[in-house]
Image: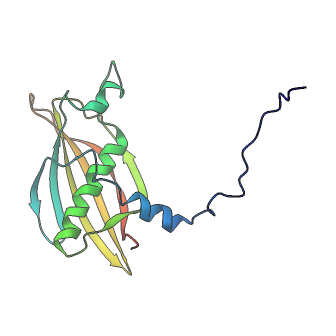
Amino acid sequence: MASDAVRIPSHRHQTPPQGPSTLLSRAFRSPPVKFQLIDQVLESTPEKVVAIKNVTSAEEYLADHFPSFPVLPGVFMLEAMIQAARTLLEQQGHPRMMLGEVRALRYGTFVRPGESLRVEVALQKQLEGAFVFKGQGVRLRQDDDAEPATAVSGRFTMRALMP
């Protein structure tokens, strides 16, 4: 008689599990950031960076977020602040930094195509191996005199990437 049993692969010959630092290290050896969320740095000092992200209808992620109401995803607003902080840290000789922690993150208004997100990040303090930033992203409209509205704000920590 022929056996109809399903063979389940053995896990005995797999490589042992790797720790979080190994996985993070591997993840950062991938190609550079796919989404460049800073179009222009408007101001840069050792303590602060002000930058702008112009949202256009050509952004590929807008097709899914959301199809009938396209807006800049909240995680991309946070990423814009992180990228701005990285530019500040790179100027100070800290080229390989990653997000360590996010605190008190708040979202306000939407940022739609045709509008801009103006991000300002300020270095609050430096701890051992970490930098604490306070950031804010404000929606700017090109076509009317509406007051700028806060789209995102919060504090976050950048840490050195382990070699």
In the image: residue 160, left or right of residue 150: right
Task: Compare residues 29 and 148 and report the one nearer the observer.
Answer: 29
Residue positioned 37% across, 44% down in the render = 75
Q: Residue furthest bottom?
A: 128
* Quarter the N terminus occupies: top right
Residue 106's x, y, as percent?
38, 47
Residue 37's x, y, as percent?
23, 46
* Quarter the C terminus occupies: bottom left
Q: Residue furthest front?
A: 1
Task: Compare residues 132 and 89 and report the one nearer the observer.
Answer: 89
Residue positioned 83% across, 32% down in the render = 5
Task: Compare residues 46 and 1 and report the one nearer the observer.
Answer: 1
Q: Quadrant of residue 61?
A: top left
Task: Please tell me whether residue 61 is drawn above or below residue 148 in the rendered image.
Answer: above
Residue 120's x, y, as percent?
20, 56
Task: Please tell me whether residue 125 is drawn above or below residue 88 in the rendered image.
Answer: below
In the image: residue 39, left or right of residue 129: left
Residue positioned 22% across, 45% down in the render = 138
Task: Compare residues 71 and 16 and report the one nearer the observer.
Answer: 16
Work out whether residue 152 can be spotted.
no
